[in-house]
Each structure stands twice: as C-alpha cells, then as structure tokens.
Image (tube, rainbow, N blue to C red):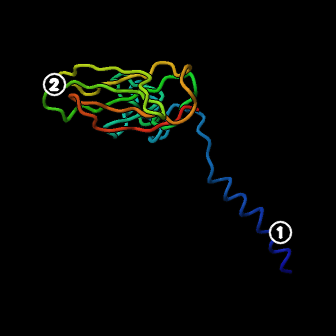
C-alpha cells in the first residue's frame, strides 16, 4: 500500500513544481523586475568605482555588466561616480599587469557637477592572461585599486 501512495504522489508533486515555473516570452507587459532591461538607459551600478564590460549612455557601468573577469582581447570599462564631488578634479586610471607595469593610462579633467567619468582599457589582446588591476587616481593621489582577471 505504501508504494502505491508514493507512485501516485510523485506526479502530483511534479505538477505543482511545473505550474510554479513560468517562462517570460517577452509579452506586451513584461514583469516589473524586467523593465530596467527594456529601457535604453540601463541602471548604473551603485558602486563609486565599477568595472564592467559595457557603459550606459551616462558613462556609467550598468549593474548588469559589472564584473571582475574579462575575455582576452575585449575592452574593460571603469566608471567613477562623481555625483558627490563638489569641485572640479583630475581623474585618471592606470591599467596595470600583475607585476605593476602600466599597460594603459588615461587622465581627464572632470568639471564640478559631472555625474560619471568613464575609462576604457582599450583592447586587451596584447595583454597577458591573468591578474591585472585598475588604479584610480584623483588629483594625483591613488584612491583605489580594483583587481580583475583577463581570461
């Protein structure tokens, strides 16, 4: 008797599991949690310094593209949230390999009131695979080092 109950229960449990799973087929009214992906302006990362594989129209790394591992040959992007800066500043980044050698460097003057400043590593095809870092320099002082991997 016990085995018949178990056999009859499994299909019933499976039907509950399957009914709970839904597939978003891109209908006219997508679920609310998908709406940010539909807009042209992807939501920026909530980090002051963000590494990623894409930038939105404001020059910020979108939350959806934040990462710390990137394919060899592709660009790595860095955005700096400048909304709390009350004065103009010089902001730069040094893209370094594991030995500390500067692979690429960029410095820009950022006026007061700017929202984001973004930088690109350029193509990483000539870089060695492995550990690297982006060192952010504000007004001549290194303020953070962000490690990442080129795979």
Question: What residue occupies the far bottom of the structure in this picture?
Answer: 1
Viewer-closest of 124 and 32: 124
Q: Which mark is residue 43?
A: none
Q: Residue at x 44, y 41 (%)?
A: 32
**Which marked residue is nearer to the observer: mark 2 or mark 1?**
2
Q: Quadrant of residue 117?
A: top left
Residue ID for mark 1: 7
Q: Which mark is residue 88?
A: 2
Q: In the displayed structure, does residue 125 sit left or right of residue 105?
A: right
* N-term mark: 2 or 1: 1
CA gap between label 2 and label 1 equals 71 Å
Q: Residues within 10 Å of mark 2 (few under 14, many from 20)?
A: some
Question: What residue occupies the far left of the structure in this picture?
Answer: 87
Viewer-closest of 82 and 43: 82
Viewer-closest of 26 and 75: 75
Rendered location of residue 149, percent (x, y) = 52, 35
Rendered location of residue 35, percent (x, y) = 44, 35
Q: Secondary structure at mark 1?
A: helix
């Amino acid at each position: 008797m016990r085995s018949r109950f178990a056999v009859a229960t499994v299909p019933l449990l499976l039907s509950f599991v399957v009914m709970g799973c839904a597939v978003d087929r891109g209908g006219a009214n997508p679920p609310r949690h998908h709406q940010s992906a539909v807009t042209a302006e992807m939501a920026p990362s909530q980090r002051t310094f963000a590494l990623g594989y894409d930038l939105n129209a404001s020059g910020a790394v979108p939350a959806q593209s934040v990462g710390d591992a990137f394919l060899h040959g592709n660009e790595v992007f860095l955005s700096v949230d400048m909304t709390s800066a009350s004065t103009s500043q010089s902001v730069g980044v040094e893209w370094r390999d594991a030995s500390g050698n500067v692979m690429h460097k960029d410095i820009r003057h950022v006026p007061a009131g700017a929202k984001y400043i973004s930088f690109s590593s350029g193509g990483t095809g000539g870089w060695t695979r492995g550990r690297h870092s982006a060192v952010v320099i504000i007004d001549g002082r290194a303020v953070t080092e962000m490690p990442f991997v080129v795979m």
